[in-house]
Amino acid sequence: MRAVLLAAIALAGAALSACGFTPMYASGGSPAISRIAVTAEDDRLGYRLREQLEDALAWDHGAQPPLYRLTTVTQQARRPLGRRIDDTATRYELTVRVVWTLTPTSGATPLTGTETSTLTYAAADQPYAAIAAQQDGEDRAAAELARLIRIDILRALSGQ
């Protein structure tokens, strides 16, 4: 019984490797993804998004010239949720929308997409704590958006 199971696993592995299957997240699966230069807006959220995207795409600074340029444009909206008796918000909802464009340096047709992340964070009474909570919300939104954009780019590049 064990020999039959091992033979079936070996046969399945051989068949899978013969079909050209490559896992999307395999290391070295898409060398082009590490050659994407990221440009974002010149503000705190843009900086955090660019930083997260460079980490997610494993941008290799300077080793080889970029094959693509990724530009992002962000819009954010903050909405108060819940009210205290003194009519101040207890939570905020932060919605960040990113329109991204991936342009090949060869001059081919660019790819575009839109991603949105919505999250909430608690409102604090102390000014420093309120700023820290808002910045933490922006950081979490940037990390989520970088993950979503990376998936979109991997999906688009795997079809080429």
Image: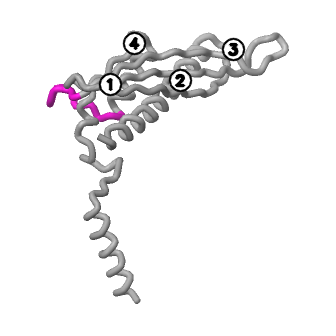
Label 4 to label 2: alpha-carbon separation? 19 Å
Q: Residue 150: which disc?
A: none
- The residue range painted magenta reads 56-67
Foreground mark, 1 or 2, reads: 1
Name the outermost residue toward the bottom.
1
Reading the chain from its start, which is encountered first: label 4 or label 2?
A: 4
- Give the Cα separation between the discs numbered 3 and 4: 30 Å
**Mark 2 highlights which residue?**
136
Under tag 3, what secondary structure? loop
Rendering coords of residue 19 (x, y %) = 29, 61
The residue indicated by pointer 1 is 110
Report, in whole angstroms, how far the alpha carbon at label 4 lies from the one at label 1: 19 Å
Q: Quadrant of the N terminus?
A: bottom left
The C terminus lies in quadrant: top left
Tags 4 and 1 touching, CB below 8 Å: no
Q: Nearer the viewer, residue 30 or 62?
A: 30
First of labels 1, 3 by sequence position: 1
Task: Check if residue 148 falls in the magenta segment.
Answer: no
**Residue 123 as seen in the image, left or right of residue 57:** right
Label 1: how many Cα within 10 Å (few below 14, some 14–19, many 20+): few
Q: Which mark is residue 41?
A: 4
Q: Left or right? Give the position of 87 relative to 111.
A: right
Disc 4: CA contacts within 10 A as few (<14), some (14-19) or many (>=20): some
Q: Earlier in the sequence, mark 3 or mark 2?
A: 3
Q: Position of residue 81 (x, y in %)?
A: 73, 20
Which residue shows up at 27% across the image and 70% down it? 14
The amino acid type, in three-letter code, at marker 3 is Asp
Q: Which residue is mark 3?
A: 125
Cβ atoms at labels 1 and 2 below 8 Å apart:
no
